[in-house]
Amino acid sequence: MGACFATTHWSVVLTAGDSASPEAQQALETLCRSYWYPLYAYVRKQGCSLHDAQDLTQEFFAIFLAKRYIATADRERGRFRWFLLASLKHFLANQWDRANAQKRGGGKIHIPLDEITAESRYRLELSHDTTAERLYERGWALTVLQETRVRLGEEYTSAGKRERFKQLESFLPGEQSEQSYAQAADQLGLSEVAVKSEIHRLKKRFGAILRAEIARTIADPNEIDDELRHLIAVLSE
């Protein structure tokens, strides 16, 4: 995450909407990268082809950035992901009758994206009884977990423990570790007791970062626990 994400709660969203802030563009582009896949999955589920979904999602963000729709976000209305999805629905309603989506780039701001990975992920998560809204919610939940994992990995790297993190990250929530504590201990040259203690600290720090990630895009810090429960419920479906 960029330096502008050092603050918590809706301040990051407000920073992105403040054209006078020198950090606004970075905040906007970081938000777009974080939410691109959930919105892509929503558009794809509407019946759009792979390429049309890519074009529409890219065009949405180009307009979102150029016209600074984020400046209209109201923290009193709740969660940022709801605001973003409502903005996408409004965009689609205005664009749906176009025969061809405007191609990526088009002289506007372009967000570099891994579209092949996005489509592969979409196909893995797709099921006939999954609604577009559920795909969006699941995409959001998985993105939050990924952002949390990335930040935790950066902390370990900064502390000179990158290899230790790579060895133990499979024990984090959302992962399925195929190795035992004993195997991890053998790989790291530590005792099994030491590895268990390290994993405990790893999970505790993961939980703290996860709460901070969620806090960044909700209006009321008292809603963090509710949002965490919602995230777990979404991933359990």
Image (tube, grey):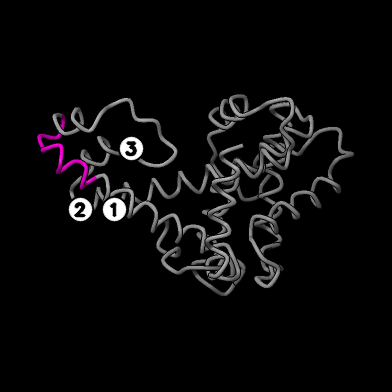
Dot 2 falls on a residue whose secondary structure is loop
Residue at the outermost front position: 193
On screen, residue 50 above or below 85: above
- Residue 236: say if magenta: no
State whether the magenta stretch is mostly helix, strand or loop.
Answer: helix
Neighbour tally class for label 3: few under 14, some 14-19, many 20 plus, Cα within 10 Å: some
In the image, is residue 104 above or below residue 126?
A: below
**Residue 192 drawn in magenta:** yes
Q: Which sits in the foreground, 190 or 47? A: 190
Residue corresponding to mark 1: 155
Of 5 and 67, nearer the camera is 5
Q: Which residue is mark 3?
A: 171
In the rendered image, the vertical position of residue 220 relative to residue 122, given as above or below: below
- Nearest to N terminus: mark 2 or mark 3: 2
Q: Residue at x 71, y 53 (%)?
A: 63
> Badge 2: how crowded within 10 Å, few (<14), some, or many (20+)?
few
Give the camera-side residue of 82 and 33.
82
Q: Report the span colored magenta.
A: 187-198
Gap in angstroms between the C-alphas marked 3 and 1? 17 Å
Quarter occupied by residue 226: bottom right
Pointer 2 residue: 159
Tag shown at residue 189: none
Compare marks 3 and 1 and give the one earlier in the sequence.
1
Whether residue 14 is situated above or below residue 217 in the rendered picture: below
When asked about the image quadrant of residue 195, the answer is top left
